[in-house]
Image (cartoon, rainbow, N blue to C red):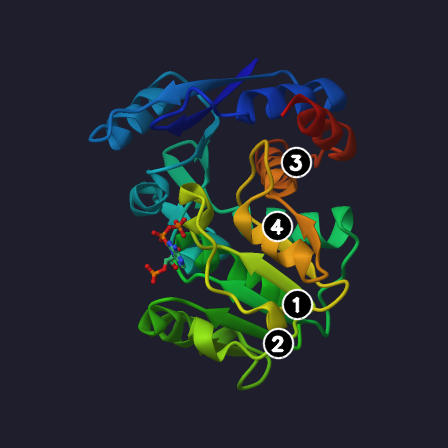
Amino acid sequence: TDKYCVIGNPIAHSKSPDIHAAFAAATGQDIAYERRLAPLDGFADTVRDLVAQGYRGANVTVPFKLEAAALATRLEERARLAGAVNTLRFDGSEIVGDNTDGPGLVADIVRNAGVPLAGKRILLLGAGGAARGVILPFLREKPEAIVIANRTRATADALVAHFADHVAYPGQIAACGFADIAGPFDVVVNATSASLSADLPPVPASAFRAGTLALDMMYGKEPTPFMVFAARHGATVRDGLGMLVEQAAEAFAVWRGVRPDTADVLAYMRAAS
Ligand code: ATR
C-alpha cells in the first residue's frame, strides 16, 4: 500500500481523503490517504517526517501552498508559474512540487460544465494565489482574452507582467479595476476570497449576459453571494466543488499515472454536501 496524505491547518474538514478513496476503489489502485495536521510553524518538519516514513506524496492546502513551493527541490512549470504547490511527489531524494488547482478548474469548466474556452473572453476576479494558479492553464486553452480585475489594481498589473512571456499576442491578458470592467464575458471566475466572509466582490451586472458561466472557486451548502448575483443577471452558476474533485483527479494522475473518472465522485460529493 502506497501512502499519501493532505497537509493543512486546519485539516479536519478536508474532503480529500473521501475523494481519493473513491478514486482508488474505482481504479483498483492500492493506496492509503489520510489527513495530516501540520503545526503552523512545522510544515517542513511534517514533510520530512512523511518522506522518512516512506510516503509517496502529499496534497497541500491552506496555509502551506507557498511554503510547499519553497520546500520543493524541483518544481513543475505550472507550479513555478503559479508560485504555489498543492501536490508533492516524493521521488527518491527529490521533493517534486506540482500544482493541479488550475488544471482542475479548467477540467471542471471544459468537461463538466461543457464550456470550451478556446476563443472565449474570460473575466478573472482577484489577483491573489488562487487567481495566479489558473492563468497558465487558462492560456493553454487559447482564450481570446483574460481580463484580471482586482481591488488593488497594482496586483493585477503585476500578474499581467508575470505571464507576459506566455501570451499568444499582446493584450491576451489585461488588468483592470472593478469599476472599469467592460463586459459581457463568456466566463466569469470568482478567485477572490470575498466569499469566505460572505461578501460580494464589486463586479458590475454588465459583466454577465444570458448564458455566461459564472464560477465561484468556493463551495458550501448555500450558493455564495457572487453566485446569487450572477444568476440574477442571467448567468449559469457553478461552485468550486467540481474544481475540488478535478484537482484531486489531476493529483491522482500525477502520482499513479491513471486519471480517474470524476462524474460519480462529483455526484456523490454533491449529494453528501
Ligand atoms: P487566495 O490565496 O485565496 O487567492 P490571497 O492571495 O490573499 O488569497 O488573495 C485574495 C484575493 O481576494 C485578492 O485578490 C484580494 O484583493 P486585494 O488584492 O485587493 O486584497 C481579493 N479580495 C479579498 N476580499 C475581497 C473583497 N471583499 N472584495 C473584493 N476582492 C477581495
- Name which of mark 2 and mark 4 comes first in the sequence: 2
Whether pointer 2 and pointer 1 mark residues with C-beta atoms closer than 8 Å, the reply is: yes
Q: Are marks 4 and 1 in contact (CB under 8 Å)?
A: no
Rounded to the nearest angstrom, the CA distance separating label 3 from label 1 is 39 Å
Which label sits in the foreground, 4 or 3?
Answer: 4
Which residue is label 1 attached to? Answer: 208
Which residue is rendered at x = 53% and y = 86% of the image? 170
Distance Cα–Cα, label 4 vs label 3: 38 Å
Marks 2 and 1, how far apart at CA: 7 Å
User: 6 left or right of 244?
Assistant: left
Q: Single out the mark in the foreground, 2 or 4.
A: 4
Q: CA distance from mark 2 to mark 3?
A: 40 Å
Residue denoted by label 3: 257
x 68%, y 21%: residue? 22
Q: Residues within 10 Å of mark 1 (few under 14, many from 20)?
A: many
Count residues near mark 2 (Cα–Cα under 10 Å), then give few for <14, some for 14-19, many for 20+: some
Residue 127 at x, y percent in the picture: 41, 62
Q: Earlier in the sequence, mark 4 or mark 3?
A: 4
Q: Nearer the viewer, mark 4 or mark 1?
A: 4
Along the polypeptide, which appears first: circle 2 or circle 1?
A: 2
Residue under pointer 4: 228
Q: Secondary structure at mark 3?
A: loop
The amino acid marked with disc number 4 is Val
Nearer the observer, 97 or 21: 21
